[in-house]
Image (spheres, rainbow, N blue to C red):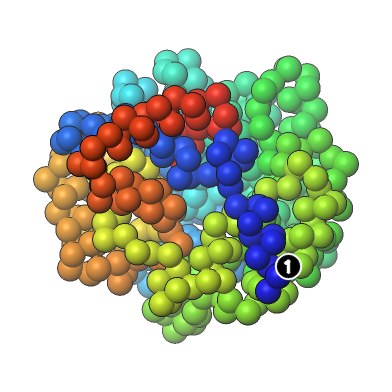
């Protein structure tokens, strides 16, 4: 276990040294946390929005696979809906009037499949100070001519590959000639060229979700991008969402032995190959490996992090978080009925939904290692000690120190 412990210690996020540090970013936004505890109106720090539930890939480990993978046809969740232009543009106009710090274009499905995405990005860029980022499989950037818009308007983009070998990539994601490995690699190179052409500051990253199907390609992925001008290569462990735990295709979290004995060694080698480009969600690995009482680090009693990072689904629902896509009972309201600002201001509805999750279900219907998981840890600790003399003042000083150190501080 010595290698595993050394890797986790050396790659766990330290203050300001990585863009993947939710706990530190929450401290930077301490003012909003304090206002929330004092029952003041607080706009989100980050909103994740799904322009599309449809996807042109079929990744088996997709956290939203229950919305679009063929094996879920006939279930209550299956919904390959595309957000309409009217709802998308109304959202863009409304969110631009709020104090929201950032938006992440994501899915659901593949965000770039929505033909109106470009107009929505342009509107928000031209009418607000909201930062934007994007998660994408990168296969459709050419179709709607998104390269210039992306490098001029986004703070970051991360292209998910999850493989380092073309044949395996195409098999894993079930691709065709229009969206395969070669197309994605070509688009990444064109994105890099566009960044240089327009002298953009955008951060271009590539992602690798480590699973039992692809872990042997960790090194291939590192070698592929070692000399390509991407800014980082991020590895993160596969997390089994609750829908896969309760379906006929039931699957539990991958055992700690897999991560400790098979993955850590390869990640250590990838780190040596990539140098400063190497990024890893090591806090998730730590929870998976230690797995105390099978809670995976979930010692908090409230999902407080979700109150700063909701998810807007392609169906128009404003969900508690990305892990609850498709679960209408965990939505605060729908953009077809009210705009986002009105829905977010309805504290009675939000408290009712959260009471169901926290007190009645006690997280039993929540995916482990969910999006707000890391934020929950630090915000729960702040709440428990909120009235401790001098604590908030000390944290405020720490918050000011962090401003110049954190990359992408508005994206939790």
In the rendered image, residue 160, in percent from the top left (x then y), is placed at: 66, 51
Q: Is residue 147 left or right of residue 100?
A: right
Q: Nearer the viewer, residue 308 or 204?
A: 308
In the rendered image, residue 222, in percent from the top left (x then y), is placed at: 81, 53
Q: Is residue 182 left or right of residue 27?
A: right
Q: Nearer the viewer, residue 382 or 171?
A: 382
Q: Is residue 269 left or right of residue 175?
A: right
The picture quadrant where one finds residue 157 is top right
In the image, is residue 11 above or below residue 246? above
Q: Of all residues shown, which one is farthest toward the front?
A: 389
Q: Residue at x 19, y 55 (%)?
A: 353
Q: Of all residues shown, which one is farthest toward the left?
A: 348
Give the residue number, with chain letter if any, for mark 1. 3
Q: Crowding near pointer 1: few (<14 within 10 Å), some, many (20+)?
A: few
Residue 6 appears in the picture as rendered = yes
Q: Is residue 331 left or right of residue 245?
A: left
Q: Secondary structure at mark 1?
A: helix
In the image, is residue 196 above or below residue 167? above
Q: Residue at x 48, y 15 (%)?
A: 126
The picture quadrant where one finds residue 284 is bottom right
Q: Residue at x 53, y 44 (%)?
A: 21
Q: Residue at x 51, y 75 (%)?
A: 253
Residue 51 appears in the picture as rendered = no
Q: Nearer the viewer, residue 127 or 3?
A: 3
In the rendered image, residue 239, in percent from the top left (x then y), is placed at: 52, 66
**Quadrant of the drawing holding the N terminus:** bottom right
In the rendered image, residue 10, in percent from the top left (x then y), is placed at: 67, 53
């Amino acid at each position: 276990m010595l290698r595993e412990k050394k890797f986790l210690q050396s790659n766990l996020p330290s203050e300001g040294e990585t863009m993947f540090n939710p706990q530190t970013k929450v401290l930077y936004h301490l003012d909003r946390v304090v206002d929330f505890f004092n029952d003041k109106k607080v706009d989100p720090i980050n909103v994740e929005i799904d322009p599309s539930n449809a996807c042109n890939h079929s990744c088996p480990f997709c956290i939203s696979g229950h919305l679009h993978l063929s094996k879920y046809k006939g279930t209550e969740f299956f919904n390959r809906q595309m957000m309409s232009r009217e709802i998308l543009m109304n959202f863009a106009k409304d969110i631009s009037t709020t104090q929201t710090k950032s938006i992440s274009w994501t899915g659901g499905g593949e965000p770039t499949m929505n033909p109106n995405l470009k107009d929505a990005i342009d509107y928000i860029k031209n009418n607000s100070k909201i930062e934007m980022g994007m998660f994408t499989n990168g296969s459709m950037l050419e179709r709607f001519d998104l390269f210039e818009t992306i490098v001029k308007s986004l703070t970051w983009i991360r292209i998910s590959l999850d493989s380092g070998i073309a044949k395996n990539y195409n098999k894993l994601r079930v691709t065709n000639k229009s969206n395969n490995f070669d197309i994605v690699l070509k688009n990444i190179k064109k994105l890099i060229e566009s960044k240089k052409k327009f002298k953009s500051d955008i951060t271009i990253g590539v992602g690798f979700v480590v699973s039992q199907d692809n872990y042997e390609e960790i090194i291939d992925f590192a070698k592929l991008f070692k000399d390509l001008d991407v800014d980082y290569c991020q590895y993160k462990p596969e997390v089994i969402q609750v829908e896969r735990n309760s379906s006929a295709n039931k699957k539990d979290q991958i055992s700690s032995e897999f991560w400790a004995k098979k993955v850590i060694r390869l990640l250590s080698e990838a780190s040596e190959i990539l140098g400063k480009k190497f990024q890893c969600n090591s806090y998730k690995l730590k929870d998976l490996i230690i797995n105390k009482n099978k809670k995976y680090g979930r010692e908090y009693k409230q999902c407080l992090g979700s109150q700063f990072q909701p998810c807007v689904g392609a169906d128009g629902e404003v969900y508690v978080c990305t892990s609850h896509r498709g679960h209408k009972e965990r939505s605060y309201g729908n953009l077809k009925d009210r705009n986002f600002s009105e829905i977010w201001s309805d504290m009675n509805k939000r408290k009712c939904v959260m009471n169901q999750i926290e007190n009645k279900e006690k997280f039993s219907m929540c995916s482990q290692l969910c999006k707000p998981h890391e934020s929950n840890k630090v915000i729960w600790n702040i709440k428990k000690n909120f009235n401790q003399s001098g604590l908030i003042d000390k944290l405020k000083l720490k918050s000011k120190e962090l401003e110049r150190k954190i990359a992408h501080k508005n994206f939790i």
